[in-house]
Image: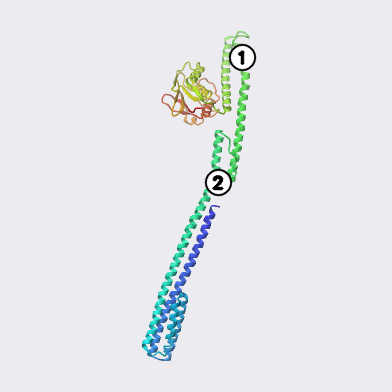
Amino acid sequence: MLALIPLIALLWQSQSDLAKVGQMTTLETRYVVDVVGDMQRLDGAVVDLERSIRQYAVIRTEKVATLSDNALDQFAVAADNLCQALSVQRTCERLSEQLGDLSDYRIIEDQLLLNAYLANVSRSVSQLRGDVELAISERVKVQQDDLNAMQAKQAWSTAMLVSVSLLLILLGSQLIVNPVNKLKQIIRIVAHQQGDLPPLSRQAPRELIDVEKDLHWLYDRLGQLEHIRTALLRHAAHELKTPLASIKEGCSLLSENVVGDLNDPQREILSLLSASTQRLNTLIEKLLDYNLLLQQAQPDIVKTDAKKLVDACLGDYALALQEREVTVSVESSHIWADEELFRRILDNLVSNAVAHGAVGRPINVHIYLDNNFAILDVANRGKRIAKESVATLFEPFTRGAEPRNDNVIGTGLGLSIVADCARLMHGDVQVVDVDYADVCFRVTIPQQEK
């Protein structure tokens, strides 16, 4: 509405100027019509006057004299009306003197003198005709100048008011765009949980301020939920480890025949219990690992021996990799990374390849540098990952649809831990297509010295 005020003012001024132009045109048209009419009547009157006086010079009767007097009166009235409209004082005074001389036509005996008087009147009438044309031309020129001035004024007013209107539109747009950009920034912060929210806006549309307040409330609520989730994971994992330790100790005592010898069926059941206990212990360690990762704020980027970390990871998985060939290619012996985070990435990707890769098929681990980035590729053979599953593959507590080779129901945290570790080191992870394997996870970490 504020931006429309200059346009409304421009419309009002345009209407006012049009009204002035219409009034001016009406007045000038009326003037031209009146002056031309008076001139036509004066031309007719001078013809009648000259004819009647010349008739009187031939026929000197009272009747012709009366017609001549009437012609003089009509000519005088027409000349007076025209002179008032033209305001040409000199010509009108001369014409008045000539009419005075001609009014004594009764006593003029000299025909040449009478002809001279009539010729003078005719010349004065011709002069008035020229004055009429000049007056009309001057009025038209004045009107044209007024129209040009009005047009220039209208152009300047249009430029100024439209500019003001555009500035107001830009100002109004900025008052909306800035809060919207701030809302987008808040949404990004809430989505990625990075940094603190900016303070509430003070100058913005009320509806956008309400949305911003709701986003602040949502951010606080998500923080509370995140704190509850972290506490739940921590307490649940620790509470489970205590009875699990007792179960493991009991299984160990039974397997050592401390409480007596076991028969074959009992040893089989004890073996199943021990395997399940070990798997449960692995799941609890995953939960603890994820909980520690959530609490880590900043990575410790140091120069890391990548080959040493890979060898240590493969050593931990030696039993699971007995029937598999692992191809390791480390083109860069040292990379800049957080050792603990990079080791977690290796553990989870290798564990994922063992659990979901085809049994007996090779696993590839490749580390190299590319455009100041450290690249880690862990590839395996087996069933390809569906494209519709890639979007949610790295979300926490998301498990794949395919069964694992070890028949263990996972927590769905492995790949999420990989993504969070890469993110903490300002990198990312994605599924890529390679020609030597069916599934390949690629971790990209920027190389920046601490």
Relative to 20, is 124 above or below?
below
Relative to 440, is 115 above or below?
below
Q: For the residue marked with disc 1, what is the amino acid?
A: Glu
Which structural element holds mark 1? helix
Residue 146 visible here? yes
**Residue at the limit of the structure toward the top, as seen here:** 261
Q: Position of residue 223 (x, y in %)?
A: 60, 33
Q: Quadrant of residue 76?
A: bottom left
* Crowd tier of the residue under label 2, counting other residues whose Cα lies within 10 Å: few below 14, some 14–19, many 20 or above: some
Q: Quadrant of residue 121?
A: bottom left
Which structural element holds mark 2? helix
The residue under label 2 is: 175
The residue under label 1 is: 249
* CB atoms of marks 2 and 1 within 8 Å: no
Q: Position of residue 106 (x, y in %)?
A: 42, 90
Given residues 7 and 123, the one toward you in this image is: 123
Given residues 378 and 263, the one toward you in this image is: 378
Q: Is residue 99 left or right of residue 268?
A: left
Q: Position of residue 433 (x, y in %)?
A: 43, 28
